[in-house]
Image (tube, rainbow, N blue to C red):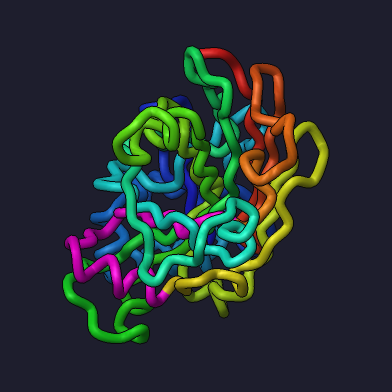
Amino acid sequence: MKLLRVGTAGAERPALLDAEGVLRDLGGVVPDIDGELLADDAALGRVRAAAESGELPVLDADGLRVGPPVARIGKVVCIGLNYHDHAAETGAEPPSEPVVFFKAADTVVGPDDTVLVPRKSVKTDWEVELAIVIGRTARYLESHEEALAHVAGYAVAHDVSEREFQIERGGTWDKGKNCETFNPLGPWLVTADEVADPQALGLKLWVNGELKQNGSTTDQIFPVAEVVRYVSQFMTLYPGDVINTGTPAGVAMGQPEPKPYLRAGDVVELEIEGLGRQRQELKDA
């Protein structure tokens, strides 16, 4: 299933994109798409049955904002330097264990919402990423099979980053990762049963119509199953939590000087095979 949330920010309602690409209202079936729903097999069964019935009300998509596909996200866990080609372009050694950092849940916005260039920023960068959405509470998972059984689905994430704040201002990466609007998510949560192999997905990103990133999850250093298993050794993952799994080569930081960092007025578009497409216009904060 392709689950999404539509409407003005803070007042989104649950919806579903059916097999024919028709947007349908789920408001009469479930109150929202969140961790509580994703952990409830009976509720998901009702959603699936409603989708298959073909009787859900049709929504007019014209002019309708798409919000983040998951409400009330508890935490956004991020994996850094998780593609061989991205590590190479930044001059970093491939890590021996996953590099873990966090984004605050309030950085998450809709897939087509405005992204704000932070005040005094000179190195705002782009990163298309596969996001994992957790569906079952995960603690100390032992195997890749067990890890994948805890995944509710997948989505497109844009891990916007400010490289000066991240790398040159001391401390951890958090200062360059948690600026407002720095995690567009969606348009859909695609349930795990519709993603045959999360390690065979193409990722692309364009800036002002120019293709900048063109990679595949086959190049991940730590695959999805290992990421979930590994992270569960250090923290409890709850239904509705999100894990951003890293970005392939092609970010601004990896380009020759002068590096083409983002500015107000730029347009970024990104997509992952089968998971949908995003488009953001940048403005000054």
Q: Is residue 11 visible?
A: no
Chain part drawn in magenta: 225-247
**Would you say 210 lies left or right of 155 here?**
right
**Would you say 280 lies left or right of 82 here?**
right
Is the residue 276 above or below the residue 65 in the image?
below
Residue at point 59% right, 68% down?
217
State the image coordinates of residue 180 (x, y, percent, origin top left). 41, 25
State which quadrant residue 194 falls in: bottom right
> In this orientation, which residue lies closer to the viewer: 81 or 114?
81
Is the residue 101 above or below the residue 117 in the image?
below
Q: Is residue 143 visible?
A: yes
> In this orientation, which residue lies closer to the viewer: 259 or 279?
259
> In this orientation, which residue lies closer to the viewer: 130 or 222?
222
Is the residue 183 above or below the residue 28 in the image?
above
**Would you say 79 lies left or right of 53 here?**
left
Residue 234 located within the stretch drawn in magenta:
yes
State the image coordinates of residue 265 (x, y, percent, origin top left). 70, 18
Residue at point 39% right, 52% down?
78
State the image coordinates of residue 231 (x, y, percent, origin top left). 28, 66
Residue at point 23% right, 68% down?
232
State the image coordinates of residue 181 (x, y, percent, origin top left). 46, 29
Is the residue 209 above or below the residue 24 in the image?
above
Residue at point 36% right, 86% down?
145
> In this orientation, which residue lies closer to the viewer: 94 or 239?
94
Residue 285 located within the stretch drawn in magenta:
no
